[in-house]
Amino acid sequence: MLTIRSHCGEKIIEDVDTTMKTLMNEIGNRRKSLLLAALLVLAPTLLTAETLLHGAPIFPAFEGWHPNSDGTFNLMFGYMNENWEEAPLIEVGDNNFFSPGNADQGQPTNFMPRRNRFTFEVTVPADWGSRELVWSLNINGVESKAYGTLKPDYLVDNMIIASETGSLGIGVSSPESRANVPPSITIQGDDIRTAKVGEAITLRAHLEDDGLPRSRARTTRGESDLHRAMFRAPQKPTVNKINALFLSWNIYRGQGEVTFDPPQTKVWEDTRVAANSPWGSLWLPPEIPEDGMIEVTATFDKPGTYVLWGRADDGGLYDDSYITVNVE
């Protein structure tokens, strides 16, 4: 029996030999050899394509740290989900925990696809010193860790955030980018709410920004834009993000699915050309009302306690807010 495995061990093609014996009765030895060669060449490609969607691991990432005005420090974390589709739920516990100390440090339990930078922060005391805070994940059979530290090399400022997320090129800045301050999101109403399965609730938030960096997004896309985007070589050695203001709601913790209306801009690095993502070259940012008030509805398919994460993003910097919803 011939067995072919993908590098992630997700999918196995077995009994190729049995199939070939059946085909042997119908075709000559020469054709059999050619067919077997084709299967051997194509199978790894097909398996690799499949494992890009599901079954690959998720790696936690330590993004850096910044000081707070009260003398404490914030350690910044994100993650890399190697899958393009699989967005697993990993509850806080043996497969998703921090150490030393409290296993729950506010990390997500719902993981979106691909690279997610600067997803959350953990505050440590002023006397943290040389200690490390370790985030451990075990997903799809792969255990990995990220080590949070106050080593000077990991100090992060606004320019580093903008550069890492793709708003700026490597080592590039300008008076405009240096003057940029993060947008702000203000939730309207209670930050703890109740809802019923299948019944939409309205999320209202006020968005403010300084207008920097100036938007690089177009308001319309024509056929020529599509052609250029499809065939243009990459312009940067890093991800290229379109600078434009938006607010996006996503599920941060919860057992079920949440449907947002209108569909929300992706906060993960979906670099596909036509993705609803500022990393997609044909992305059109949503229109921001003049009063800055944005309404989105959320509908839940299962009961339970959910944490919804709202991120305001101007292309370079961001602001986060959260709502807890108890669904009956």
Image (spheres, rainbow, N blue to C red):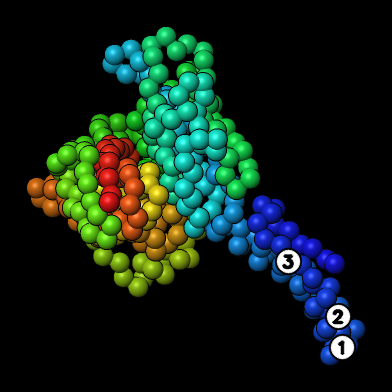
Q: Which residue is mark 2?
A: 21
**Could you tell me residue 267's position as x and y percent?**
37, 48
**Could you tell me residue 273's position as x and y percent?**
42, 62
Is residue 123 shown above or below 256?
above
Q: Is residue 301 visible?
A: yes
Q: Which residue is mark 3?
A: 13
Q: Residue at x 42, y 39 (%)?
A: 108
Mark positioned earlier in the residue sequence (1 or 3):
3
Q: Residue at x 45, y 33 (%)?
A: 77
**Could you tell me residue 146's position as x and y percent?**
54, 31
Based on the displayed image, in which of its 4 quarters is residue 118 positioned? top left
Residue closer to the observer: 161 or 142 = 142
Q: Residue 25 has which mark? A: 1
Mark positioned earlier in the residue sequence (3 or 2):
3
- As shown in the figure, which amino acid type bears the numbered disc 1? Asn
- As shown in the figure, which amino acid type bears the numbered disc 2? Lys
Left or right: 37, with 319 as reference point: right
**Tags 1 and 3 touching, CB below 8 Å:** no
**Tags 1 and 2 touching, CB below 8 Å:** yes
Distance of label 3 from label 2 (alpha carbons): 16 Å
Residue closer to the observer: 126 or 87 = 87
Describe the element under mark 2 as helix, strand or loop: helix
Residue closer to the observer: 36 or 57 = 57
- As shown in the figure, which amino acid type bears the numbered disc 3? Ile
Q: Residues within 10 Å of mark 3 (few under 14, many from 20)?
A: few
Q: Residue at x 79, y 72 (%)?
A: 16
